[in-house]
Amino acid sequence: MYRRKEMPQIFEMKLRSDPFRRICSGEKTIEYRLQDEKRSLLNKGDYIRFTEIATEGTERTVLVEIVDIITAESFVGLEYKLTELGFLANESFAPAGMRKYYSEDDEAKYGVMGIKIKVVRVDDQSKINA
């Protein structure tokens, strides 16, 4: 399903301040998303530039590399897989907490993914050529 392309791509995503800060500090190493049309294009070795959703006039970004992608039919199933792989040792993931971002219908329609990441660079005004 995820085939390696010749050149890594950079994808753009937005994050709220708390998860943004936790990624920058290295505390958060997995980002949870629906496996919708946009995210199904992600591959290991690609990059994601997360932009913090913050007050007007500020633009903080963090560039991360995708280290692994774990998929499941539901966030409960993803929690199980991530626990089996030993990826949740330092994570606090509550599948029910994802309901504030994604509906049960969307979860059932698309499936979900855990995107294992590592920080490459933190910038306040990142302008990386894609």
Image (cartoon, rainbow, N blue to C red):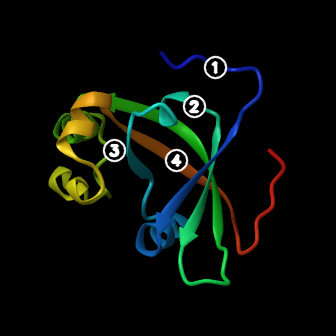
Between the residue at mark 1 and the residue at mark 3, the CA separation in whole angstroms equals: 23 Å
Secondary structure beneath label 3: loop
Quickly name the residue at label 4. Answer: 117
Quickly name the residue at label 1. Answer: 4
Ranked by sequence position, the earlier of labels 2 and 4 is 2
Residue 44, disc: 2
Secondary structure beneath label 1: loop
In the image, which is nearer the foreground, mark 1 or mark 3? 1
Which amino acid lies under the numbered mark 4 shown in the image of this protein?
Answer: Ile
Q: Residues within 10 Å of mark 4 (few under 14, many from 20)?
A: many
Q: Estimate the x, y position of residue 66 in percent, counting from the top left.
A: 56, 40
Q: Is residue 88 above or below residue 34?
A: below
Between the residue at mark 4 and the residue at mark 3, the CA separation in whole angstroms equals: 11 Å
In the image, which is nearer the foreground, mark 3 or mark 2? 2
> Looking at the rendering, in which quadrant would you find the C terminus?
top right
Residue 72 visible in rendering = no
Ranked by sequence position, the earlier of labels 4 and 3 is 3
Residue 87, disc: 3
Q: Is residue 108 above or below residue 127?
A: above
Residue drawn at (67%, 74%) of the image: 59
Between the residue at mark 4 and the residue at mark 1, the CA separation in whole angstroms equals: 17 Å
Residue 38, disc: none
